[in-house]
Amino acid sequence: MRCGLELHMQLDTGKLYCRCPNIIKMDEKPDYVIKRKLRAVVGETGELDIAAKREEEKHRVIHYNCYNDSVCLVDTDEEPPKEVDDKAFRAALEIALLLNMKPVDEFHIMRKLIIDGSAVGGFQRTGLLANNGYIQTSLGKVRIKTLMLEEDSAKRVDDNSFSLDRLGIPLVEVGTEADITDPNQAKEAAEKIGMLSKFTGKLMRGIGTIRQDVNVSIEGGDRVEIKGVQDLRMMPDFVKLEVERQQKILLIRDELNKKKAVLKKFEDLSKLFEHTNCTFIKKALIEGEHVIGARFTNAKGILGTIIQADKRFGKEIAEYLNVYTGVKGILHLDELPNYGVTKEEVAKVLKELKCDDNDSFILVMCEQTERSNVEFIIKERVEQAYKGVFREVRAPNHTNGTTSFMRPLPGSARMYPETDIPVVRVTGELVGEIITHLSQTPEQKYDFLIGSGLNNELAQQLLHNIDKLVLFEKVINETEVDNKIAASLILNNPVEELKVDSVINVFKLFDKGAFSKEAVPSIIERLKKEDFEKVVNDYRSVSTKTVMNLVLERIDYHASEIFDERAFGVIMKELMAELRGRVDASDLSKVLKEELEKKKLLK
């Protein structure tokens, strides 16, 4: 097994070729919508990329959601791009140097043809910034092949709609060589690259800001890219199951060739199911679709072969068909009778298609106008199996580690030079300046945390949560809050769900005594849904005079009924119910104790 990684990391600097801010919308209504129909064009090699050609064949009109505060004419491809954002360029260079990479002398931008709808102009701008780096893992060195600085793609809303808020956000793509030989090493390498990059403090935070693609191949197989692995904990599972899938595909290849299996011509079998009790076949016939089927000679048992977890080869064909036609599902002999299809109906199909004992068959429901394309796509996937593993991009299923076909693996035919943006020189002075201010390594960062007064437990927790580590450093740099208190509050509260500026402002107010330490968790929790000023005002500290008056009031209230050690606990409980979060508990306890002793109610 050989495995390589591609990590895509968003930079928190503003968009790459315009000066719009990075504002990711969730489910907000767009301010306006534009429409585009994208077409494939030849690349620099004069060839048409296979992935682009297949996307064009879908003849889709794409709708793009636009927002006034984060989308401009550059994003809609109605205005030429501006120069490369300097902050993003420097941040990408810093990441490259942390990965022991060699920056290029000149940054040349290319256009990468993408017409799946995720790039409104039909291409994505990308450029090589550094190469020849490495990281160390427990199983040896993993070489870093390239670091690309590119613009992120548009965010998919549904099959024919995208949101342009994400388009143009600077994206660093780090690609390793295929040096990874163990599934767990893949996870370790991804964690190491992500950790070093996050140490710069220049990556965006939140779900989807870092995306991993995993490339896997085995001897006799071919490179397959698993696109968008979000959960690092599942990366070993995806690698293991892809290895298993390729091994099974190779066995199926050998079996098909050994038995000389052939998928014959499709025939209309609708009449055989006129009285069927199979719900989805009955529904398809009512809606005017036809049931077509083809004999698969000498292929009995092959379509039912499990290739990955509980996934059969027949499912692999069905997913491929669905991507290109929208037709959902096929039926084959190895899984019948089932789904309401009876033994008698299976016998009729076998007879109609003239199947022998060693034969199988494929059934599919489609409209007559789709029939020729459906037949072509099914035959194409079967023919690929005769050759073995097909070079392709696959989508991950994070529930069980399986994958499904997305598109063919793109080639070099989709690249051609950018003509609107000048070359950027990477000078020795610039590299030297960045090296001078280079982020610390994990080992150096640990020493810094221990030196700042944190214990080993707090230091290790921060090292393994880079977002919170970056936030911790900002808090201690911008406030005088005690380092241990700052670390504890950041680690034990969901600060990652808030904007960084909001969290910093909470700590600044806490530092000035605006509210007590006990108030911080409640404030952070409420800020997820409520206005900043309203929440903070609810926890504003009360004056010393007010605290003293409340203490004396409570003591006088209870003086006639409590004359022993119970007095402190009862009164403290009542005061905290009224003042929690607005006064430090230890300070309140001290004042109450002193006043009780003065009145000789506490010995």
Image (tube, rainbow, N blue to C red):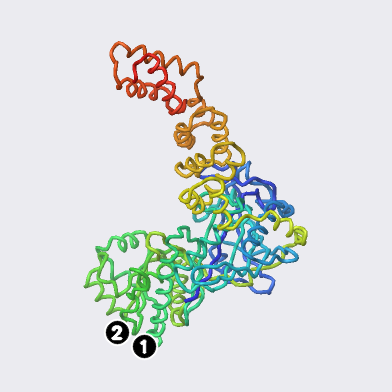
The numbered dot on residue 358 is 2
Image spot of residue 436 (x, y percent): 71, 56
The secondary structure type at the circle numbered 2 is: loop
Image spot of residue 12 (x, y percent): 61, 49
Q: Is residue 452 left or right of residue 322?
A: right
Image spot of residue 250 (x, y percent): 42, 81
Above-or-below relation of 297 to 420: below
The secondary structure type at the circle numbered 1 is: helix
Residue depicted at 53% across the width and 74% down the height? 179
Q: Is residue 547 left or right of residue 286?
A: right
Would you say the residues marked 2 and 1 are in contact, meaning their CB atoms lie under 8 Å apart?
yes
Amino acid type assigned to the residue bearing label 1 in the image: Lys
Image spot of residue 211 (x, y percent): 53, 58
- Residue 37 position by quadrant: bottom right
- Look at mark 1 in the image and give the residue it sits on: 259
Disc 2/disc 1 C-alpha distance (Å): 10 Å
Seen from the viewer's position, the closer of residues 4 and 493 is 493
Above-or-below relation of 430 to 496: below
